[in-house]
Amino acid sequence: MIKYSVQCQKGHGFEAWFQNSGAFDTQTKRGLVSCPDCGSIKVTKALMAPNVSTSARRKGRGRAESNDVTVAAEPQVKQPMASPTVALPAEMAEFLRKVRREVEAKAEYVGPKFADEARKIHYDEAPERGIYGEASLDEVKALHDEGIDCLPLPVLPEDRN
């Protein structure tokens, strides 16, 4: 995972996480990255300070800088990507609720069999339809590697309680 400082065409700055630099390029071209302040999908990488590894920090003696990117060996899939301390504007939270209700109303819940069912649909072994369910980070990565697109359902403020 890599964290980028991103800026929209109106100058709003924010941070976003991506699997790699190619994922940033792909997602921005498809209009999947938007400014949390104004909703603009015209975003670019902003100037970032490099994360320089010194010998003291490599040996664990140095204090980590605030712009360090840490990749856990076993990511916690259940944790939302957004910081739980960041409050969503009311309009955005309501929009995310609407998106989630729409998916839940029009798609079939397949539970923990999401990855298997997505493959069956992709390879024409099951009828094409919208599905949602649970998948581990490794399962989602494997789906992506096979060319099977999937996105997480929005995490709502009430989900964090």
Image (tube, helix red, strand yellow):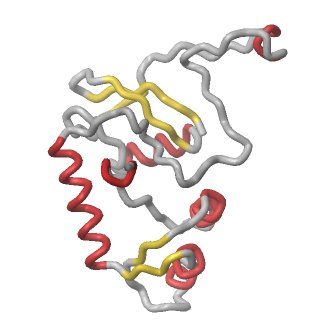
Residue 56 percent coordinates (x, y) = 80, 8
Q: Is 152 situated left or right of 123 in this image? A: left
Q: Residue at x 47, y 81 (%)?
A: 110
Residue 66 percent coordinates (x, y) = 55, 16
Number of disc labels = 0
Indicate whether 14 appears above or below 98.
Answer: above
- Quadrant of the rendering where the N terminus is positioned: top right
Q: Quadrant of residue 68?
A: top right
Q: Is 14 situated left or right of 36 in this image? A: right
Task: Pick out the residue farthest to the left.
Answer: 91
Q: Quadrant of residue 140?
A: bottom right
Q: Residue at x 19, y 34 (%)?
A: 38
Task: Pick out the residue farthest to the front.
Answer: 161
Q: Is 138 situated left or right of 8 in this image? A: right
Q: Residue at x 56, y 66 (%)?
A: 135
Q: Is 63 situated left or right of 78 in this image? A: right
**In this view of the protein, which residue sits in the foreground, 117 or 44?**
117
**In this view of the protein, which residue sits in the foreground, 46 or 15?**
15
Residue 37 percent coordinates (x, y) = 23, 32
Residue 18 percent coordinates (x, y) = 52, 41
